[in-house]
């Protein structure tokens, strides 16, 4: 059936309040989009949800809904009713699930690695194919930080090696490493949902027997030939001793989730353990990678 969409301009302080207003006015669904394409990651357990400074809050209404009544309701409770910025749009009747699925296509990283949604045909049967659908946790290859790490893994000889995926999220990097020949991957994440998503994705790719998943409090003590940490600059800074402890002598380390203006600080910090270089940049995001020497 046809729908009407109402868009309200908000910020990080008003987004949730506006969402509640739209729900109260009869919206069938409410979603948030970033008006300026600024990445925000999943909050830590117990932390508040963080919204963008320029957020568009969108309510979806049945086309028969009285939208004049909705707009009057919103103006009645909006603190600046004269300057309430909103937009009404008529949406055509379509299969929304199919529309969403059509946005995801197989993606190639490096020379041999593909990330493929389950409903798409695999482009190259002889390539290294990871089957992964958008789901519970961040990480389908679409974000530059993930793409940078996937390309790095694709360029390594992982045959028979142990890999640590610190902040594993959906498990995309773990799965890629296993499909590229790693003997075993240790995935670590603060979010139990991420571990569940990683396990389900590993089963879909038939590599669950070589994937071990841990919350930080349970993480094992070991050293691996390859360690990758795709998180954020703040946690990378705080967890530097923990992350580098996993890197064996002459082992390789990659860090991502780092903006260009944060790279120098982290390069200096991790230089206490590893010879790090900001060797890859994609859309203002940096991947630092290097080798541990003198461990």
Image (cartoon, grey):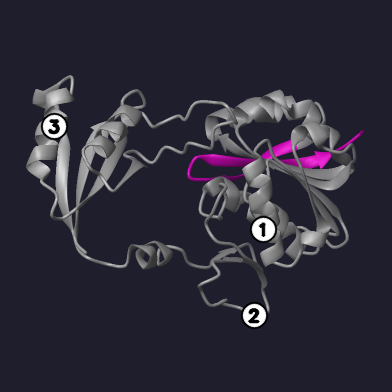
The magenta-colored residue range is 276-295
In percent of width and height, residue 222 lies at: 90, 40
Tell me if residue 41 can be seen: yes
148 with respect to 5 (left or right): right
Residue 288 is inside the magenta segment: yes
217 with respect to 137 (left or right): right
The residue depicted at 71 percent of the width and 63 percent of the height is 203
Q: Quadrant of the C terminus?
A: top right
Measured in 3D between alpha carbons, the distance from the residue under mark 1 to the one under mark 2, in whole angstroms, is 22 Å
How many numbered discs, if any? Answer: 3
In percent of width and height, residue 267 lies at: 69, 30
What residue does disc 3 label?
73
Which image quadrant is residue 97 in? bottom left
Prevailing secondary structure of the magenta residues: strand
Tell me if residue 154 can be seen: no
Nearer the observer: mark 1 or 2; the answer is 1
What residue does disc 2 label?
125
Label 2: how many residues lie within 10 Å, few (<14), some (14-19) or many (20+)? few
The residue depicted at 82 percent of the width and 61 percent of the height is 209
Residue 97 is inside the magenta segment: no
Which image quadrant is residue 57 in? top left
Measured in 3D between alpha carbons, the distance from the residue under mark 1 to the one under mark 3, in whole angstroms, is 44 Å
């Amino acid at each position: 059936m046809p729908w009407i969409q109402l868009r309200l301009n908000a910020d990080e302080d008003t987004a949730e309040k506006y969402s509640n207003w739209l729900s109260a006015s009869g919206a069938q669904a409410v979603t948030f989009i970033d008006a300026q394409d600024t990445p925000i990651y999943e909050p830590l357990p117990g932390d508040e949800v963080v919204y963008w400074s320029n957020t568009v809050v969108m309510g979806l209404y049945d086309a028969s809904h009285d939208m004049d009544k909705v707009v009057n309701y919103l103006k009645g409770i909006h603190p600046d009713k004269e300057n309430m910025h909103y937009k009404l749009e008529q949406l055509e009747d379509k299969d929304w699930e199919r529309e969403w699925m059509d946005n995801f296509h197989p993606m190639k990283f490096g020379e041999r690695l593909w990330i493929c949604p389950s409903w798409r045909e695999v482009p190259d049967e002889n390539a290294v194919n990871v089957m992964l659908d958008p789901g519970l946790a961040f990480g389908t290859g679409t974000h530059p930080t993930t793409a940078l790490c996937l390309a790095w893994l694709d360029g390594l000889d992982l045959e028979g090696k142990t890999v640590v995926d610190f902040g594993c999220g959906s498990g995309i990097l773990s799965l890629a490493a296993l499909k590229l020949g790693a003997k075993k991957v240790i995935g670590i994440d603060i979010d139990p949902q991420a571990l569940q998503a990683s396990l389900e994705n590993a089963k879909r790719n038939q590599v669950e027997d070589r994937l071990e998943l841990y919350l930080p409090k349970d993480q094992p003590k070991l050293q691996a030939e390859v360690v990758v940490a795709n998180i954020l600059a703040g946690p990378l800074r705080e967890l530097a001793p923990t992350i580098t402890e996993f890197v064996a002598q002459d082992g390789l380390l990659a860090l991502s989730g780092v903006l260009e203006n944060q790279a120098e600080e982290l390069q200096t910090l991790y230089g206490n353990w590893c010879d790090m270089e900001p060797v890859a940049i994609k859309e203002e995001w940096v991947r630092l990678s290097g080798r541990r020497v003198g461990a």
